[in-house]
Image: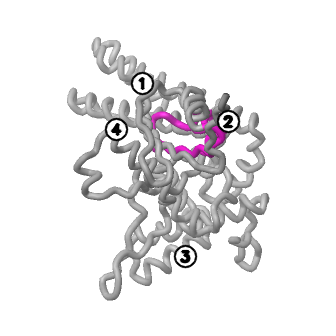
Amino acid sequence: MTQCSTLSFKGQVIYCGIDVHKNSWKVHLRHCHRDLDKFSMNPDPKGLADYLKKKYPEAEYRSVYEAGFSGFEAHRALCALGILNIVINPADVPTSGRDREYKNDRADSRKLARELENGMLEPIYIPSPENLELRNLVRRETQVVKNIVRVKNRIKSHLFFNGIKFISWSGRSLKILELDAEKRDDFALLSLLRELRFLRLERLKIVEDEKRCLKKHKREEVQSHLQSIPGIGFRTAVILQAEIWDPARFQDKEHLGSYSGVAPHLVGSGEHEVVRSCGNRKRKQLHYILIEAAWKSISYDLEQRARYGKLLAKGANPQRAISIIAKKLLYTIRAVWIQKRDYVKLESGNTVKNC
């Protein structure tokens, strides 16, 4: 009786492109630069791992999916199951004219598998669960702040429309406004004032949660060091922690500057080179908070104010000048963070070394 040999893919690699959706995954497999299989399945990392191990035993499995709404839990689950998964920025996937013309879910998964096999995909940074916890909380605060601004604008529009003079956002002024609205039976204004009160209270609660989160993950010392820098308050420092987390993960300060959107780059060649910003690839909240901190720093730090004045004297417009100040500030932030010390300005005018 002839004994059947056991199928084995030992020493071989199966490449898996996953087009992720809320209720399904479109999966495409490649092997030795050939299409191997394609199928739809429930979004189940264990189900995919079991299928690969059963059909292609002892192989090395590599997979990829695009960053988006699905987060990173699938990535962690796939890695835990022995699949070498990476997550990529959708903008980094090489796309031809044909790919754009015939774009669909199956084509997307095939393209991901193909480019993974060709070594053309660069993984993005995967934040730790601790980093994500703080980041989600900080971004929630940003949403609440935007809602506060929205409600304030609606209140001012309502007052202007009804010929009522706006005084200020102080508690006393808002109380007077509320009493007046009650006398006039202005129910719309009363509703807006209740919403504003709720949002302000919610933001205070979120700030307390941020402090608890920093303590939970032993980030209070870093927070203190960052807040020692002129122009950096609690909110700016906590956003820096949430969005950067660990400056050592960047190769150097220029890479951190590019990530943060304060290090513009040259585009073109010869006589047609122009300076461009980092566009949509920059972290918008991080970029905004650094620019805001730069404006504050020229008010609190005489050295920064003098640097800003020199830039204006050389012909830089205010936006360009403050971007340069923001980049310098970011390098100071990085130095303080890495050296684990407070910002110290020496008598000679020097500060902590920008390593």
Which of 191/166 is in front? 191
Quarter of the C terminus within the rendering: bottom right
Query: In the figure, is residue 309 to the left or right of 340?
Result: left
Query: In the figure, is residue 296 to the left or right of 336?
Result: left
Residue under label 3, please give it: 307
Q: How far apart are marks 3 and 2 (CA)?
A: 51 Å
- Magenta extent: 57-84
Q: What residue type is labelled 1?
A: Asn
Whether residue 195 is in magenta: the answer is no
Q: How far apart are marks 4 and 3 (CA)?
A: 52 Å
Q: Nearer the viewer, mark 1 or mark 3?
A: 1
Mark number displayed over residue 80: 2
Mark 1 and mark 2 lie on one chain; the one further toward the N terminus is: 1
Residue under label 4, please give it: 105
Q: Which of marks 1 and 4 is in front?
A: 4
Q: Is mark 4 on a helix, strand or loop?
A: helix
